[in-house]
């Protein structure tokens, strides 16, 4: 298991949010409480083992507004077994990687749409014999799953995380049936639920101008460094940022990645490098807004840009710090 990174990188993030000297004058001191709360949240997140997500397909059999993986606007695309195996081979060669990640999450889109899902699961176990494999699915296609897939899930020790949505499906029954096959299955992820029992997503629109304060965005982010993403030979600190390309393809935006936004798998020798990487802000954090997050009741996507990108009528809280 990789050791935790030095505290210096965390303290630096906190001091930068307050001011260059860590005190920053009266205005910055007036923001101490907010900074301290963000920093405390950041510490809590950093002391949890991250997951590593892999989108096996880009599209989904649901059409959820504000989907963080942008599935409603994605063209149907399936991860190839050859590309996946190449990344798995590199990942398996990284010292401590299997112990570092809490799980590798096979997801999407909807992973059960992949015609070679069983093969991809077996490849994962072949190259990562000790890691927890977690299939993250909305569960709507589980009843149609082949006996070969169920056998593969059981033989590889893959667990299923079913993300419930208000579709009328008996999700508890789906989980029960999976468990009768000897497979660990749980409900999790997906929607948050209000006190009134209504499902909702959190809409946190992106700033296409990239004018946000990256330190503050990083400290407040619920994703950065905790839900890492494997994509085309690279590890990104969060799934949402890794998948910017879908927005560019659909809406002609220019959300760009810089070299410091990711790690090349072939260049990583130990899990310590991944741990160090995930603990600090990234250039792409400048796209993430603060103060515009709001609840959006679960429902169908209109596939309009304002589900993911700041609209003309929304006021941005920008920053000169980059």
Image (cartoon, rainbow, N blue to C red):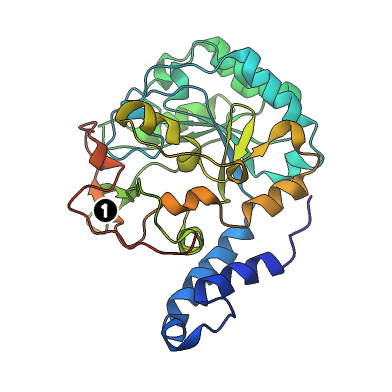
Q: Is residue 187 visible in the rendered structure shown here? A: no
- Which residue is pictured at 51% across the width and 76% down the height? 18
- From the viewer's perspective, is residue 21 above or below residue 304? below
- Which residue is pictured at 61% across the width and 57% down the height? 280
Residue closest to the eye, 114 or 261: 261
Residue at image mark 1: 295
| Residue 271, x across and y down, in percent | 76, 45
Q: Residue furthest bottom?
A: 26
Q: How many labels does the image show?
A: 1
Q: Is residue 51 left or right of residue 268?
A: left
- Which residue is pictured at 61% across the width and 29% down the height? 158
Residue closest to the eye, 82 or 107: 82
Residue closest to the eye, 173 or 304: 304
- From the viewer's perspective, is residue 119 above or below residue 170? above
| Residue 157, x across and y down, in percent | 66, 28
Residue closest to the eye, 321 or 299: 321
Q: Residue furthest left?
A: 313
**Callout 1: 10 Å neighbours few (<14), some, many (20+)?**
few
Q: In this view, does 165 lie to the left or right of 49?
A: left
| Residue 116, x across and y down, in percent | 55, 11
Q: Is residue 257 visible in the rendered structure shown here? A: yes
| Residue 121, x across and y down, in percent | 62, 21
User: Label 1's element?
Assistant: strand
In the rendered image, which quarter is residue 143 located in? top left
In the rendered image, which quarter is residue 133 located in? top right
Q: In this view, does 258 lie to the left or right of 317?
A: right
- From the viewer's perspective, is residue 290 above or below residue 37? above
């Amino acid at each position: 298991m990789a050791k935790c990174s030095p505290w210096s990188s965390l303290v630096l993030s906190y001091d930068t949010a307050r001011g260059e000297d860590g005190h920053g004058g009266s205005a910055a001191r007036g923001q101490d409480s907010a900074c301290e709360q963000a920093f405390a949240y950041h510490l809590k997140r950093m002391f949890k083992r991250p997951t590593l997500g892999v989108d096996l397909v880009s599209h989904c059999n649901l059409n959820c507004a504000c989907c963080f993986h942008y599935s409603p606007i994605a063209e149907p695309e399936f991860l190839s077994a050859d590309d996946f195996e190449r990344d798995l081979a590199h990942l398996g060669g990284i010292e401590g990687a299997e112990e570092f990640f809490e799980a590798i999450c096979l997801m999407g889109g909807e992973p059960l749409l992949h015609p070679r899902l069983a093969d991809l699961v077996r490849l994962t176990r072949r190259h990562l014999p000790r890691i927890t494999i977690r299939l993250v699915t909305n569960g709507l296609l589980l009843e149609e799953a082949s006996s070969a897939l169920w056998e593969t899930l059981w033989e590889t020790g893959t667990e299923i995380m079913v993300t419930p949505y208000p579709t009328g499906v008996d999700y508890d029954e789906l989980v029960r049936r999976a468990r009768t096959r000897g497979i660990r299955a749980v409900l999790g992820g997906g929607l948050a639920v209000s006190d009134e029992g209504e499902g909702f997503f959190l809409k946190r629109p992106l700033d296409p101008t990239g004018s946000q304060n990256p330190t503050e965005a990083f400290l407040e982010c619920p994703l950065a460094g905790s839900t890492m993403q494997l994509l085309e030979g690279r590890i990104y600190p969060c799934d949402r940022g890794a998948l910017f390309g879908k927005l560019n393809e659909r809406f002609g935006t220019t959300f760009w990645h810089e070299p410091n936004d990711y790690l090349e798998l072939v260049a990583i020798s130990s899990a310590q490098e991944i741990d160090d990487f995930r603990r600090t802000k990234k250039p792409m954090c400048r796209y993430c807004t603060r103060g515009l997050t709001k609840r959006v009741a679960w429902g169908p996507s209109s596939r309009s840009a304002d589900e993911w990108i700041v609209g003309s009528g929304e006021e941005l809280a920008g920053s000169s710090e980059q």
